Image (tube, rainbow, N blue to C red):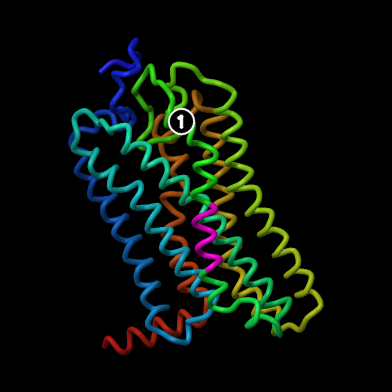
Amino acid sequence: IVEKMENSSEIVSFVLAAFGNVGELKYLYFVIILFWYLSICVANTVLILVIRVDRRLHEPMYILLCNLCVNEINASTSLYPLLLSQMFSDSHEVTVPWCFLQMCCLYTSASVELCSLAAMAYDRYISICHPLRYNVIMNTERVFLMILLVWLYSFLSFIFSFSFIFSLKFCGNVIHNTYCDHQLIIRLSCSVSIQSFISDISFATVSVFIPFSFILVSYMKILTVCLKTSKENKQKAVTTCTPQIISVSNLFVGCIFYFIDFRFVVSQVPDEVHIILPMYVLIFQPMLTPFMYGFNLPKIRQSYQRFLLKRK
């Protein structure tokens, strides 16, 4: 397989070149990745089941949390099965449709993550700043409508930003990464236009800047109200908002790692760091969510304890 091909019609698959020749270490990597993937699925599924079984948790905040956990499983499933399958592959090839599908799932999940956190921030804003109207504004039907809109908005933002990639003609097929990243795929096209830059700006604005601004405004208003309220209400607000603030902060750090790696110091970092940095959010965020919410929210912690006592 050659990296440059004169006839773009010959490109039917991409090669994930970052796997390289890991030799006997592939068995160790396989076990570690499989263990981490299964741990993510189990941790998030347990949290979903606890919320589903305990009727005391059938509240808007916990329904939105379930949606966040579903997205963590979705994002992980978009990445890890392909990583596992490539460990024992000699060619490390991925067909073009599968590569596009992974790209669609990963970027849609990234948008869903931030939009879900924006929905949860809005829920906390209504709960803390307008407690008397909370049950009217955040009724069950409206919560499920918000979840539907989050997924639809995220999918359409991906299609609007990156659908042009599907029609590109490719003159190369070697992706120097362990997954299908849109920036590296665009670099393989026979002609890179201004459209690729516009698509990045579009996706960053619609899927990152707008949700993040919404989160920031919500928490600024919550902070303003908390400064005027009692110590007990301040503590309650801190307890319920802390996991979301940590999640948003971790996503922000992940975005910094991603763009630093690709935009500024690509040639100055070791290959291992070059591979891991863009995957920081995909590695840690799906495990951070169930543990942060499971151990920090009193109602969920109590529900865990009741669930374990019943099992015993």
Residue 71 in the figure: left or right of residue 235: left
Q: Which residue extends farthest right?
A: 228
Q: Main secondary structure of the magenta part?
A: helix
Q: Secondary structure at mark 1?
A: helix
Q: Which residue is mark 1?
A: 165
Q: Position of residue 209 (x, y in %)?
A: 65, 47
Q: Residues within 10 Å of mark 1 (few under 14, many from 20)?
A: some
> Which residue occupies 23% across, 42% down?
85
Quadrant position of residue 8: top left
Task: Write down the region rendered in magenta.
Answer: 145-153
Residue 180: in magenta span? no
Say if 190 sits above or below 182 in the image: above
Residue at the image point whose x is 40% and y is 30% from the top: 271
| Residue 152 drawn in magenta | yes
Rendered location of residue 293, percent (x, y): 49, 70
- Residue 18 point in image, percent of width and height: 34, 30
Can you tell which quarter of the image residue 130 is in? bottom right
Residue occupying image coordinates x 65% and y 81%: 136
In this rendering, is residue 91 above or below 121?
Answer: above
Is the residue 250 above or below the residue 55 in the image?
above
Q: Is residue 185 above or below residue 25?
A: above
For residue 228, side relative to residue 111 (left or right): right
* Residue drawn at point x = 45 percent, y = 85 percent: 302
Q: How many marks?
A: 1
Image x and y of residue 40, in percent:
35, 60
Question: The residue under label 1 is which amino acid type?
Answer: Ile
Of the 4 image quadrants, the one containing the C terminus is bottom left
Task: Name the quarter where the N terminus is drawn.
Answer: top left
